[in-house]
Amino acid sequence: MTGQPGQPPEAGRQPETGPGITRRRARTRADLLQAAFRVFAAKGFGRVSIEEVCEAAGYSRGAFYSNFTTLDELFFALYREHADLIAGQVSGALALDGPDLDVGAAVDRVTDVLLLDLDWLLVKTDFLVHAARDPAVAATLSEHRARLRGAIADRLARAHARTPLPVVLGDADGAAHAVVAAYDGVTVQLLLDRDVDGARAWLRQLLTALLTDGSGTAARTH
C-alpha cells in the first residue's frame, strides 16, 4: 500500500461543494467505513484489498477514491472514529458527578458503557501491530491514547482535592495511565476467552482496586 499513513482524508483533493453532494459523500464515506470495519475484523488489515472493501459496501473504486487515497488512510479514519467514541464514553461517564467524585460509582458507569467489542478489538490489534512497524502510525496511535488519558486525568484532577487518589498512583496523570493499562490488559484477555461479561466484571474489579481502597471508597491520604 502506498500513500502517507497520517495524511488527512481530504488532502490532495479539491473539496466538493453543495449540500446534496456533501450529504451524499458523507453517506458514502460512512458506508465504506462500516464495510471496511467488517472486512478488516474478518480477514485482518494487510489481507484486504480496496476491491473487497468496495464490494462489501456496494460501491465502485471511484467512490472509494473520492473519499480515501489508500487503505491506510481509511484504516486511520476507522481507528479515529472508534477511539473518539471510547474517549467520549469515558468522559461522559466521569462527568456525571459533581466536584465530589464518587469513584466507585464512576467506575461502575465507565465499565457499563465502555466499548468492549470483539470485532473492534481485532481491528485495534491490527492497528497496534501496524504501528509497531511504522513510526508515523505509532505517532498517531500515541496521540489518540494521550487524548483518552487526558480525558480521564482531567476529571480525576478536578476531583483530586476532595477525593484523594491512592498515593502509589502519584498524580491524576499517573492514575489515568493506570486506568488505560487496565483496559489494555482486559481487552487482551477478552480476545483470548471472548467473555465480554467476564471482561466487564474484571475491569470493574481492577479499576476499583486501582482508584480506591478496594471497597469502592476513595483512598485517604495522610
Image (tube, helix red, strand yellow):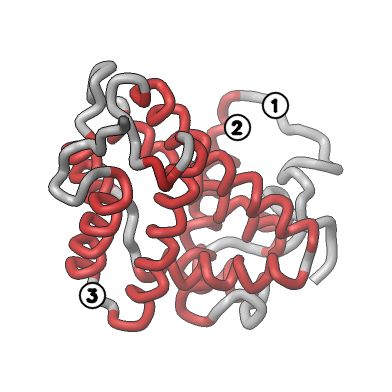
Front tag of 3 and 1: 3
Earlier in the chain: of badge 2 and badge 3, it is 2
Q: Please name the residue that numbered disc 2 is placed on.
A: 22
Query: Residue sitting at 51 percent across and 38 percent down?
Result: 173
Residue 19 location (% of width, % of height): 58, 24
Q: Position of residue 25 (x, y in %)?
A: 60, 41
Q: How many marks?
A: 3
Depth order, front residue of 101/41: 101
Is 145 or 60 nearer to us in this picture?
145
The residue that appears at 30% across and 44% down in the rendered structure is 211
Q: Is residue 89 visible?
A: no
Alpha carbons under labels 2 and 3: distance apart? 41 Å
Residue on which disc 3 sits? 195
Q: In the rendered image, is residue 133 in sight?
A: yes
Instruction: Please state if 182 lies on the left or on the right of 195 as rendered.
Output: right
Residue underneath mark 1: 17
**Vertical position of residue 201 compared to residue 207: above or below:** below
Q: Residues within 10 Å of mark 3 (few under 14, many from 20)?
A: few
Crowdedness of circle 2 by 10 Å Cα count: few (<14), some, many (20+)?
few
Question: Residue 181 location in percent, x, y?
Answer: 45, 58
* Front-lying residue, 26 or 11: 11
The amino acid beneath tag 1 is Thr
Residue at x 58%, y 43% (from the top left corner): 146
Measuring 73% from the left and 59% from the top, which residue is drawn there? 137
Circles 2, 1 touching at the beta carbon (< 8 Å): yes
The amino acid type, in three-letter code, at marker 3 is: Asp
Q: Could you tell me how far apart the alpha carbons at marks 3 and 1 are, in whole angstroms?
A: 47 Å
- Mark 2 vs mark 1, CA separation in Å: 7 Å
Specify whether 81 is left or right of 88.
right
Task: Give the residue type at disc 2.
Answer: Thr
> Residue 82 in the image: x percent, y percent?
47, 51
Q: In the drawing, what numbered circle is on residue 75?
A: none
